[in-house]
Amino acid sequence: MSDNKPTEAGDIQFTPLAPEFLKNPYPFYSQLREAEPIHWSPLGFWVASRHADITMVLKDKRFGKQYVKRMTSRYGPEVMEKPLYAMMSRWMLTQDPPDHTRLRGLVVKAFTARRVEEMRPRIQQLVDGLLDAVQDKGEMDLIWDFAHPLPTNVICDMLGIPEEDRAQFTDNSTISGRLIDPTPMSDAELDAANASNAALEDYFHRLFELRRREPGDDLTTLLVQVEDEGERLSEEELIANIILLFGAGHETTVNLIGNGLLALHQNPDQLARLKADPSLIPNAVDELLRFDSSVQMTTRTALQDVEIGGIEIKEGEAVLALLGAANRDPEAYEDPDRLDVGRHDIRPSSFGGGIHYCLGAQLAKNEAEIALSTLFRRLPDLVLTGVDQPDWRPTFTLRGLMSLPARWTVPSRSAAE
C-alpha cells in the first residue's frame, strides 16, 4: 500500500451508485478535478479525473489490465471460481499482450473502415423500418422502440444471428452494465447475471455449430474457422469474446443515441441548430459523445511504480480513469459544460485509448449519425415527454436511460406519401 494515500478524503466521496451521482456525475467530477485529481478511494483504487492524466494512463505501456490479479487481490482467489468472472477473464477487453494482441488481431478484420462504410445502407434500412413501425402511432419509447433494436440488429447481422433468433436479443437487455462497475455486484445481481450469461453461452454454442455446418459472411463464421499461426481460438475464448462483442456492440450505442437525444432536447437551441443544418450531425455526434459519454470509466493497473500528477502509484495498484471527467475538463475544452454541436477539434475520450481503443467506434458513430438525421427528417416535431426527470439506469460505467418517451404529430397520409 502506498504511503502517500490520503487518510482524509475531506468532502470528496466516490459513491458511483448513489442516486444523485447517477443522475448527474459531472459536478462531482469538477469538484474532484479541482480538489484531488488523483484521489484514493476507500473502495481500493485510485481515481483519475484530469484529461491529461487519463490520456497518459490509457496510452502508457507501464499500465495494463491485469484483470485476474486485480480481481483476486481485491476479492480473494475464489472470485475466479464464479462462472461470470471466469468468462470475463477471457474477454479481449481484460487481456494484456500477447493474448490481447492475438485476440484483437482476429476480430479487427470485421471492423475495417471499408466494411463499416459498406454497412451504411443496411443501417439506414433498419432505421427506416423501426420508424415505419411507429410513425402512425404518434408516440414511442425512444430507447426500446428505436435506440435499442437498431444496434442490436446491427451486431446480430455482424455475428450472423438468424432473424428468427433475434427476438430474445431485441426484446430484452441481456448484458448487465453492473458487470463492469467499480462497486461489486450483490449476490442477487450476480445470480441474475450468471443466469443471463449461461443462457447466452448456450445460445452461442448452438450458433457455432450452425456456422460450422453452414458458414456465412459473418464474424462468427470467421472466428470459428480462423487460425492464428496454426492455433485456433479455444472454445472458452470464442464464447467469451462473442459475448463481449455482442454486449459492447449494442449497449454503448443504445446509450449514445439515448443520451444524445436527451441532451439535444435539454438544449433546444442546439437541437434547432442541428435541424437547420444537418451537415453538422457528424460533428454533433462527437460532441454528444463528449458531453454525456455512454462509457464513464475504464480501469488500468500499474505494471511498475508510476508517478501521476505528483502522486506515486505503486505496482499492482489500480487506476480508475474517469472518461466522463476527461471529456468535461476545462484544460481540454473551453466551457466544457456547454453543449455546442459546432464545437471544433473534439476528441472525446469516450472510446478509451491505447491498445484498447474501441474497435467499433466508427460503427457506433455511423449508427448515431443515421439514426439522428433520419429521426429529424421523418419526425420533425418529435418532443420528449420526460426531459425534466430522465430515468437513468442504476449503473455507473455504462451511462444510459431506462426509457425515453416521445410523441409527435402523426403525418397525414398525403404527407407520408
Image (cartoon, helix red, strand yellow):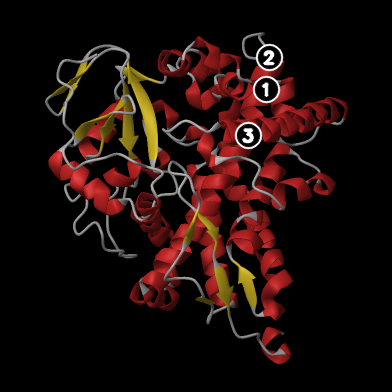
Q: Say what secondary structure mark 3 lies in.
A: helix
Question: Residue 374: x and y, percent?
Answer: 57, 69
Residue type at numbered disc 3: Ala
Q: CA distance from mark 1 to mark 3?
A: 19 Å
Q: Say what secondary structure mark 1 lies in.
A: helix
Q: Quadrant of the N terminus?
A: top left
Q: Which residue is mark 1?
A: 238
Disc nearer the start of the sequence (1/3): 3
Residue type at numbered disc 2: Ser
Q: Are marks 2 and 1 in contact (CB under 8 Å)?
A: yes
Q: CA distance from mark 2 to mark 3?
A: 23 Å
Q: Which residue is mark 3?
A: 193
On the rendered structure, is 388 left or right of 305? right
Residue occupying image coordinates x 32% and y 24%: 44
For residue 398, above or below residue 86:
below
Examine the image and state in which quarter residue 174 appears: top right
For residue 39, above or below residue 408:
above
Which mark, by number, is residue 234?
2
